[in-house]
């Protein structure tokens, strides 16, 4: 594994190795015995979009591993004035040991990896959010047991970066995945093509009740992602009914956990009640960003 650009590039074995290492790093940290596995290493973090969790967890993670992280706002980099991604990649490769990038286009992340000579980590694009889904899988293993095969993951809402990455991650871990999205907001074609090989382990519907039946993990995400702010009104109409609420939870399995990558818009994609009932799982998920990403950093930069 050279980069983390999308979960489609990883084998189930590679995902499991990351999750096992994440568990190990989490217990080392809790026991007060962390090992500085990335002493002297520097991670550059390019942000074209806002972030709370990704920025803080990567920065803290590098510090805990004995290295350091540089926050690089795209507005302040020459990239914001038109310097190409290809040249930026070749320059940053001369200074840094790794790059984390959050941006709009997946293609930009792939080009950064192609032109640079150091590992590149996708910290969210419009298409995928692999770091988040590694943390989600880590959390699912903590609540449901290490073997996720046979468990049912349900996603209700927009067929966005989270839906795309969850479908790939869930299926690769042996889960069955059901997705409820309005017709015009379906997951990406590349993801649906990938999922087609899994037969009836993957279902796509426009009916949230059908998708929720028998779920062990219920996941949702905002109706309007970063960059879609001007579509808010139209999306509020399209996604009415695509809400994780008490009725939807009553159709899931007993013990079903709830995951939300955050930030949440309570009252839209999830009710206040469901969010607060499952807050422990959701904030464990947020914490696990730190541990899962440290595992990725150790694998790629170590
Ligand atoms: N879930 C997530 O990626 O959060 P941030 O946008 O705060 O980084
Ligand atoms: N789908 C959301 C996820 C935020 C972490 C977005 O892209 O804004």
Image: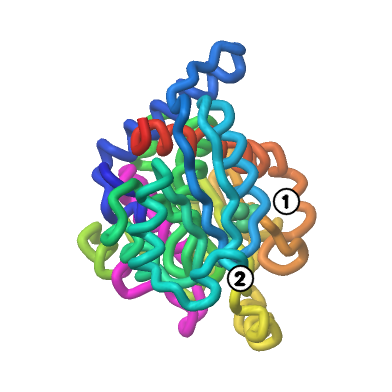
* Left or right, residue 174 beside residue 165: left
Q: Is residue 9 above or below residue 32?
A: below
Disc 2 residue: CB within 8 Å of ligand 2:
yes
The image quadrant of residue 266 is bottom right
Q: Which residue was labeled with disc 1?
A: 275
Q: Nearer the viewer, residue 90 or 285?
A: 90
Q: Give the mark, 2 or 1, whose residue is nearer the N terminus.
A: 2
The image quadrant of residue 234 is bottom right
Residue 75 in the image: state x and y as whole percent.
Answer: 61, 68
Q: Which residue was labeled with disc 2?
A: 226
Residue in the image at 70% along x and 59% along y: 264
The stretch in magenta equals 163-192
Residue 19 in the image: state x and y as whole percent.
Answer: 41, 33
* Left or right, residue 165 beside residue 224: left
The single residue placed furthest to the bottom in the displayed view is 234
Residue in the image at 59% along x and 51% along y: 71
Circle 2: element type: loop
Residue in the image at 51% along x and 44% along y: 136
Marker disc for residue 118: none
Circle 1: element type: helix
What's the distance in space between the residues labelled 2 and 1, CA to CA?
21 Å
The image quadrant of residue 105 is bottom left
Please state, as top left, top right, bottom left or bottom right, where the N terminus lies in the image.
Answer: top left
Q: Is residue 189 above or below residue 176?
A: below
């Amino acid at each position: 594994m050279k980069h983390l650009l999308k979960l489609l590039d990883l084998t189930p074995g590679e995902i499991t190795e990351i999750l096992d290492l994440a568990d190990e790093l989490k217990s080392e940290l809790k026991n007060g015995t962390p090992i500085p596995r990335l002493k002297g290493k520097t991670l550059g973090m390019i942000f074209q979009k806002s972030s709370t969790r990704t920025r803080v967890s990567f920065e803290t993670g590098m510090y805990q591993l004995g290295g350091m992280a540089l926050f690089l706002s795209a507005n302040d980099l020459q990239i914001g004035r038109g310097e190409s991604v290809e040249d930026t990649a070749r320059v940053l490769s001369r200074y840094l040991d790794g790059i984390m990038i959050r941006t709009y286009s997946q293609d930009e992340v792939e080009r950064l990896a192609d032109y640079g000579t150091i590992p590149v980590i996708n910290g969210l694009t419009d298409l995928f959010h692999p770091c988040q889904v590694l943390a989600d899988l880590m959390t699912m293993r903590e609540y449901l047991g290490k073997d996720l095969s046979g468990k049912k993951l349900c996603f209700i809402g927009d067929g966005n970066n989270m839906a795309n990455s969850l479908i790939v991650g869930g299926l690769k871990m042996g889960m069955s995945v059901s997705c409820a999205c309005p017709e015009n907001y379906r997951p990406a074609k590349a993801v649906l093509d990938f999922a087609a090989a899994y037969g009836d382990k993957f279902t796509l519907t426009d009916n949230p009740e059908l998708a929720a039946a028998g779920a062990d993990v219920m996941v949702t995400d905002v109706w309007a992602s970063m960059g879609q702010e001007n579509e808010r009104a139209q999306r509020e109409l399209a996604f009415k009914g695509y809400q994780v609420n008490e009725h939807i939870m009553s159709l899931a399995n007993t013990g079903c956990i709830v995951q939300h990558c955050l930030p949440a818009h309570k009252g839209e994609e999830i009710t206040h009640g469901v969010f607060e009932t499952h807050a422990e799982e959701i904030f464990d998920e947020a914490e696990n960003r730190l541990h899962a990403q440290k595992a990725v950093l150790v694998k790629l930069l170590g």
